Image: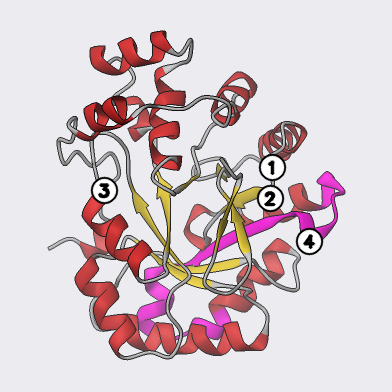
Amino acid sequence: MQNHIALNTGATMPILGLGTNQITDEAEVIRVMKDAANLGYRMFDTASSYKNEDQIGKGIRELDLPREELFITTKIWNTAQRIGNIEGAFERSLERLGLDYVDLYLIHWPVPGCCLDTWHEMEKIYHSGRARAIGVSNFSQIQLTDLMDHSEVIPAVNQIEYHPLLNQDPLRQFCQKNGIAVQAHSPLARGAYLKKDVLTRIAEKHFRSVAQVGLRWLIQKGCSVIPKTAQLDRLLENSQIFDFELDDVEMATIDSLNENYHSSTLPEDLLG
């Protein structure tokens, strides 16, 4: 199994990265990033709404790694989309991160009536080289189709909630057919499936944890994963998913666990 996934830009993206939502204390962010980097993590996912881009930027400088070794993702929030301040929001993210460019810039949520205008401004950012790739998050097949039908640049990535209790195979297949890489956020469903008996049995067979089995299921489908944790032992556990393989029966068994369960919720400004 390769530890990178090809993007439609010609670049590659690590299969494994670190999600950083809700990790905001500066000392903790820097510690977690150092721990992750020491274990081989090179992809760090943030967003303007996480309120930790400043801290992530300091963590990047503390790592003292060549910039080209890192893959940094951030996202534009709904408010900036509604007021049409895409360029300003992006520049503020760059400033907080202390970077000249990000590797991936995402529309965080599909805001009705805003997506196309937001995307067209992001295309300009992409062409300027300040975002090496642009993509979307939490987009459905219908929303992606509309975007592609009215745009020049096909999204490089669709970052979606994806785990054994929320099997997104139809959307994944659509994305991959159209050259859009799929990245799973909340791949551990915030612990919701970690005590499932069937997953426990599969994990025991491979001398692995249930979390490792869930992540392995995703990467065997060609997805990138960004589990979030601040604990060193979990960082290590989540990184040890490249040296075992689930067979076809095990993959199908996990496929059957789908409950359409969402561990993350729509932002309040998109409800109703």
Q: Do the residues under discs 3 and 4 have CB atoms within 8 angstroms?
A: no
Distance between the alpha carbons at the discs numbered 1 and 2: 5 Å
Q: Amino acid at mark 1?
A: Glu
Is disc 4 placed on a helix, strand or loop? Answer: helix
User: Which residue is located at x 40 percent, y 40 percent?
Assistant: 218
Reading the image, the residue beneath label 3 is 265
User: Which residue is located at x 38 percent, y 45 percent?
Assistant: 221
Task: Please report whichever mark, 3 or 1, sits nearer to the chain's N-terminal start.
Answer: 1
Is disc 3 placed on a helix, strand or loop? Answer: loop
Reading the image, the residue beneath label 1 is 26
Q: Quadrant of residue 216?
A: top left
The residue stretch that appears in magenta: 61-88
Reading the image, the residue beneath label 4 is 68
Distance between the alpha carbons at the discs numbered 4 and 1: 23 Å
User: Which residue is located at x 44 percent, y 89 percent?
Assistant: 120
Q: Do the residues under discs 1 and 2 have CB atoms within 8 angstroms?
A: yes
